[in-house]
Image: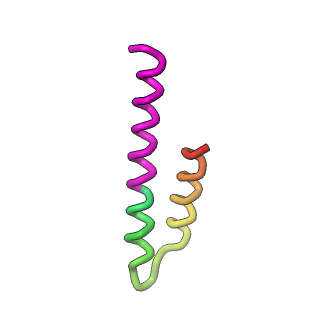
Amino acid sequence: MGENKRLRKRLRGLEAQIERHWAKIREEESKPVPDWGLVRKWEREIRVWEA
């Protein structure tokens, strides 16, 4: 597999993971008593992946 193809595949995987985390954040925030610790953890992970 070429380097560009490998990088594109990795990027698609990270984008999918970011979308899953945003979905988890939305779901957690919709709860009557959200766990803000989890939300902060997911947001931190998203920032790392976006960097």
The residue under the point 47% across, 21% down is 4
Residue 24 to residue 31: above or below: above
Query: Residue 26 occupies which quadrant of the picture?
Result: bottom left
Q: Quadrant of the N terminus?
A: top left
What is the magenta segment's predominant secondary structure? helix
The residue under the point 57% across, 64% down is 40
Q: Nearer the viewer, residue 6 or 38?
A: 6
Question: Is residue 28 rendered to the left or right of residue 36?
Answer: left
Highlighted magenta segment, given as a residue range: 1-20
Q: Nearer the viewer, residue 38 or 23?
A: 23
The residue under the point 44% across, 60% down is 22
The residue under the point 47% across, 26% down is 7
Residue 28 to residue 10: above or below: below
Q: Nearer the viewer, residue 1 or 24?
A: 1
Residue 48 point in image, percent of width and height: 59, 47
Does the magenta-highlighted stretch encompass residue 9?
yes
Residue 3 point in image, percent of width and height: 48, 17
